[in-house]
Image (tube, grey):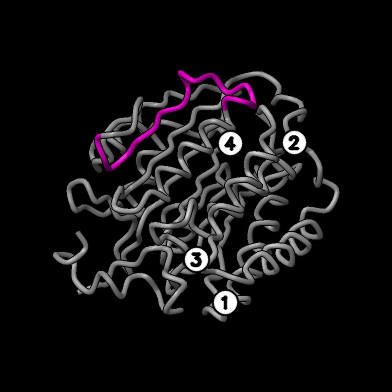
Amino acid sequence: MAGIGCNGAVDARVPYRARFATRAGRRGRGWGRRFRDLLAKSAGARLHGLAGACAFAAVLAAAALGGGAGQSIGTPRAAGGHWHAVLAAGDSSEPVFDNATGALRDWLVEQSVRPEDIRRFSAGPGVPGSARSLKRKLLQGIAGLSARPGDRCLIFLTSHGEHGGGFYLAAADETLAPADLARALGQGCGRVPTVVIVSACYSGAFAAGAMPAANRIILTAARADRPSFGCQADRTYTFFDECLLDALPKAATWAGAFAGVRACVSGLEQHLELEASEPQASFGTAVRNLPLRF
């Protein structure tokens, strides 16, 4: 049976999926400063020396971001239309997934995205303002976005991943396959510029097959055959989500943000001597240089 992976445990330097051998067994106000504070908490004393890796990763990320560095809350808003966002945490057994959707929601609101245009999903019952992360409800939420010409869509999914299966939704022990997501995107977002971010082990499968389209940017935390890391309970975010939240306020384009995220993740993994997760991306021909503006 295909193994479930979750953005990895760092202590044993092996993928976190080792704890899930079978499916039955797994059960802007000062945004930059706030993120740095959270980042410091997430490292923890038991990861002594990780601060150096973060600093090294930040240097790599700054180089990758290039001219977009330093651009933050003052970035001009996208001309016309609205952003429609769906943010989903697929598992509540570790807090990192809900932490990431909550932080991204706060940042989007600071960028003037209307709260009513942000739909948040959680696997647990204790997240205010969120719906349960059930496959049917999540797909309905995406398919029902009703984006119009001039609008944009943002889909952010963070959870465990199943090798060869898809994105794990723990509430009903389900997996979301790339083809399912592609169909829902076609209904809810049509041909408007759409950014899809899938943060999970083996999530590179979402950057291939039915998912790529001329109007879509797809960013994933790992190759289709690689785990990603950082979802243990004492962290604030997974590696990928941490690097993403750090890169978004600094980048001028989504391509620049991805370059920064990839460099940041690589720096963290190299410091801990982990197998490279190799985040993947697909940029459609119509959105290769889509500005990171809201």
* Amino acid type indicated by mark 3: Ala
Q: Which mark is residue 72?
A: 2
Judge the density around disc 3: few (<14), some (14-19), many (≥20) Cα neighbours within 10 Å.
many
Residue at the outermost front position: 45
How much space separates mark 2 and mark 4, taking CA atoms?
Answer: 21 Å
Say left or right for 73 vs 93. right
How much space separates mark 3 and mark 4, taking CA atoms?
Answer: 23 Å
Mark 3 or mark 4, which has the lower sequence index? 4
Confirm whether the magenta stretch covers residue 115.
Answer: yes
Mark 4 or mark 1, which has the lower sequence index? 4
Per the image, label 2 sits on a secondary structure element best described as loop
Task: Please name the residue shown 55% across and 45% down the image.
Answer: 216
Name the residue carrying label 1: 272
How much space separates mark 1 and mark 3, taking CA atoms?
Answer: 17 Å
Above/below status of 68 relative to 10: above
Q: Which residues are magenta?
A: 109-125
Task: Please name the residue shown 54% across and 19% down the image.
Answer: 114
Judge the density around disc 4: few (<14), some (14-19), many (≥20) Cα neighbours within 10 Å.
many
Per the image, label 4 sits on a secondary structure element best described as loop
Name the residue carrying label 4: 193
How much space separates mark 2 and mark 1, taking CA atoms?
Answer: 30 Å
